[in-house]
Image (tube, coloured by chain):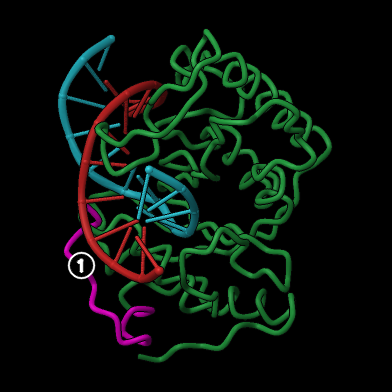
Chain colours: A green, B red, C cyan
Amino acid sequence: MNAPLPPQSLDELLTRAKMMAGLSLGQLAAGLGWPVPPNLKRDKGWIGQLIEQELGATAGSRPEQDFLHLGVELKTIPIDRSGKPLETTYVCVAPLMDTRGLRWEQSLVKHKLERVLWVPVEGERDIPLADRRIGTAILWQPTPQQSASLRQDWEEIMEFIALGKVHRLSARHGEVLQLRPKAANAAAKTDCIMEDGTVGLTNPRGFYLKIPFTQAILRQAFDY
DNA sequence: GCCTGATCATAC
DNA sequence: GTATGATCAGGC
């Protein structure tokens, strides 16, 4: 259907994002010629893909920022009536093999979070999907304090992984960043380092931002 | 009510 | 299986 071209500048991206603010998902979907699913149970990535399309991100499954030429990663984030995030935010998969020597500076977490365009969307389940409204987008870069917190959690988690203790990590680890399963289901397996140094199998994991962290990002932008 | 572990769709 | 986009939902 209607497929906007990629924005050619950061200003153009921000202008497009501002034009979406206040619109409902139904309005946006209609403009793009997309059908609205009854709910997100079987379409968990629908909102993210809709916003991607509207803003002209290159669809696809390439492990890159959404707007590589602008150095911007796009994240939609479901919020409640008070503006608080309803869910944690997925960042990227966690490497579970050959992690010795991997440094924060070269990590995928740091790279993905260097510049993020956050698009808040009403996410409460009692609001019909088509009626949920899009909020004001926020272009964010981590403050030195936020970057230090992310780095500390990342290093602690990666230390566990490198020592073959990934099975001892839970979502409770980390102040702002957590490790959780990221797969089709619990039967999915991938190679990992075991405590005796051999190679074993475990559930694929991903890094997620905890809710208070993203809540602080929204709060610092909207000053509430 | 919140959170952690589990799960859904799709492309390749 | 891995990567993209995330939310679901039962146990606490």
Q: Is mark 1 on a helix, strand or loop?
A: loop
Asked if residue A101 shows in the view, the reply is: yes
Which quadrant would the C terminus of chain A be assigned to in this image? Answer: top right
- Residue at (45% x, 88% y) in the render: A3
Figure check: A142 above or below A45: above
Residue A38 highlighted magenta (yes or no): yes
Residue B11 spot, x, y in % from top left: 36, 71
- Residue at (65% x, 29% y) in the render: A99
Residue A182 highlighted magenta (yes or no): no
Residue where numbered disc 1 is placed: A37
Query: Magenta residues?
Result: A27-41
- Residue at (20% x, 67% y) in the render: A37
Asked if residue A224 shows in the view, the reply is: no
Which quadrant would the N terminus of chain A be assigned to in this image? Answer: bottom left
User: On the picture, is A159 further left or further right than A32?
Assistant: right
Q: Is the magenta stretch mostly helix, strand or loop?
A: loop
Residue farthest along the bottom direction in this orientation: A2
Q: Mark 1 lies on which chain?
A: A
